[in-house]
Image (cartoon, coloured by chain):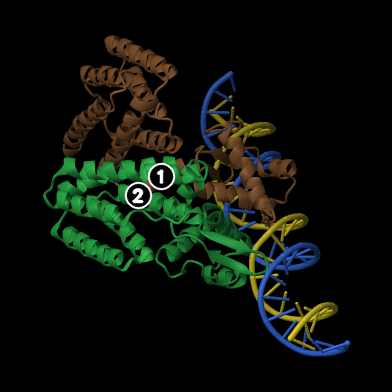
Chain colours: A green, B brown, C blue, D yellow
Amino acid sequence: MIQKINRLSLVEQVAAQMEQLIEQGQWKIEEKLPPEMELMEKFGVSRNTLREAIRALVHAGLLETKQGSGTLVKSASVLGAALKRHVKKSTMLETLEVRFSLEKQAAKMAAERRTEEDLTKLEAIVLKTKVASEKEDIDQFITSDIEFHKAIVQASGNQLLIDLYEHMTDLLYSFVHDFLDMQPSFQLEQGLHLNLLDAIQKQDQASAAMYVENDMEVLKDYILKMTEE
Amino acid sequence: MIQKINRLSLVEQVAAQMEQLIEQGQWKIEEKLPPEMELMEKFGVSRNTLREAIRALVHAGLLETKQGSGTLVKSASVLGAALKRHVKKSTMLETLEVRFSLEKQAAKMAAERRTEEDLTKLEAIVLKTKVASEKEDIDQFITSDIEFHKAIVQASGNQLLIDLYEHMTDLLYSFVHDFLDMQPSFQLEQGLHLNLLDAIQKQDQASAAMYVENDMEVLKDYILKMTEE
DNA sequence: TCCGTAAAAGTTGTAGGATGATTGGTACAT
DNA sequence: ATGTACCAATCATCCTACAACTTTTACGGA
């Protein structure tokens, strides 16, 4: 068996290593990288080669360089950064539609495939959401609300679905956070959570999909109303 | 209102221009770029700067360089390339699930929003598919089959949905094409087309979604059977 | 003429050095 | 305390040189 010679360019090798360092969290987000001189020595390449690698990741949205100051880690995911740039062009509502379409599929698959572990996790999140709701702790409520939706999608077991959904959710919330105080009705969201959890427990795919769909309609109307003003 | 100063680096300016040239089709896929020397003069930058810009697009998957030969355009879309790299890690079946989830959403939206123009286009494609089916022209049949599905999604009017769907479809078909002769039943696919077109004409969202769902199940079983062997 | 080989030309890959531009901090004079 | 000038660190850009690889051309032998 003849093997293709490993002739990845030095630049791509360096870039791949840096991506790995970021993905593994050894270079954390918002943290500064060592200066070019130091990196040159560590990787054992010339300045040009190193800079081309850095530039590749900058363009991909993983890094950001500031002349005179240094280089920062800005994102840990290529897919996320690509979506981010793309979504800026489309509207928030379009993103919402796609996201819910994904979540609906996920809810059905979750109802079909969920494990006991998934159920335990979902129940814990529902409880946490309830507590936040009673305390009227909006931040905590939103956080665990997002957590709940993500957990549903994770229970689907489809990794592509999980990745797409998570990135779109992050986008959507950072988008929303910028210009309005998201204050969805506590009771309403909680009602959905309980119903959806119930459907998934009973492995009732049709109901799971339906509850997600209802939620989408409500949230869509809500956002339409907010953006009209 | 204080505005952030526009100080894009030369590298990013060059990269952006090149991206635009690719997106607009002035540099076509699989075509060779002018050599570095020429580009240096055209953009008015040094070789290092130009190379960093090229490297950024290479890493993003838009370009591919071959030492001693030249630089080729490999993709016209950043999102497409990002998905491509990502999808390699997930399975074909996962991709299929996500794609159908998107198409189902699209079918409902198409039923709601389709214009007369959309309908005319769909009818034309159905006719083309029928002709190919009668001639038993498999290539043409597959081509217009894809065209039909894409047209449905385009009628949804959601640009993010359209982009995601198209890239995933391209991926899926290039994937499938690699290791099996896709020979879905002519009659079956054509039946779906007619039913789906009918539902969209009548603006019946529920039926449109249902037909897509049925199709998904059939195709899923088909692929499962093929990959088992 | 045809074919294979060698030379040449063209192109990207990598290295190293030099200078400019920007940032952040320090020391000093007021 | 404040503001100014200066300095050090860092990235941005440019330049030159050579290595590695590919494609084209030229040439010599059958």
Of residues A154 and C6, the one drawn nearer to the viewer in this rendering: A154
Q: Badge 2 sits on which subunit? A: A
Of residues C27 and D12, the one drawn nearer to the viewer in this rendering: C27
Q: Quadrant of residue A109?
A: top left
Task: Name which residue type carries label 2.
Answer: Tyr
Question: Which residue is depicted at the point 22% across and 41% down?
Answer: A210
Q: Which secondary structure, mark 2? A: helix
Up/down of A155 relative to B79, above or below: below
Indicate the position of residue A181 as horizontal and vertical percent values: 45, 56
Q: Are marks 2 and 1 in contact (CB under 8 Å)?
A: no
The local crowd at label 2, few if under 14, some if 14 to 19, many if 20 or more residues have their Cα within 10 Å, is: many
Q: Badge 1 sits on which subunit? A: B
Q: Which residue is mark 1?
A: B83
The local crowd at label 1, few if under 14, some if 14 to 19, many if 20 or more residues have their Cα within 10 Å, is: many
Task: Judge whether residue A158 can be spotted in this image.
Answer: yes
Question: Which residue is depicted at the point 25% across and 41% down?
Answer: B93
Task: Judge whether residue B178 can be spotted in this image.
Answer: no
| Label 2 – label 1 distance at C-alpha | 13 Å
Q: Which residue is mark 2?
A: A165
Indicate the position of residue A220 as horizontal and vertical percent values: 38, 42
The extreme left residue here reads A202
Question: Which residue is depicted at the point 40% across and 47% down?
Answer: B85
A54 displayed left or right of D2 = left
Indicate the position of residue A43 as horizontal and vertical percent values: 52, 68
B211 displayed left or right of A180 = left
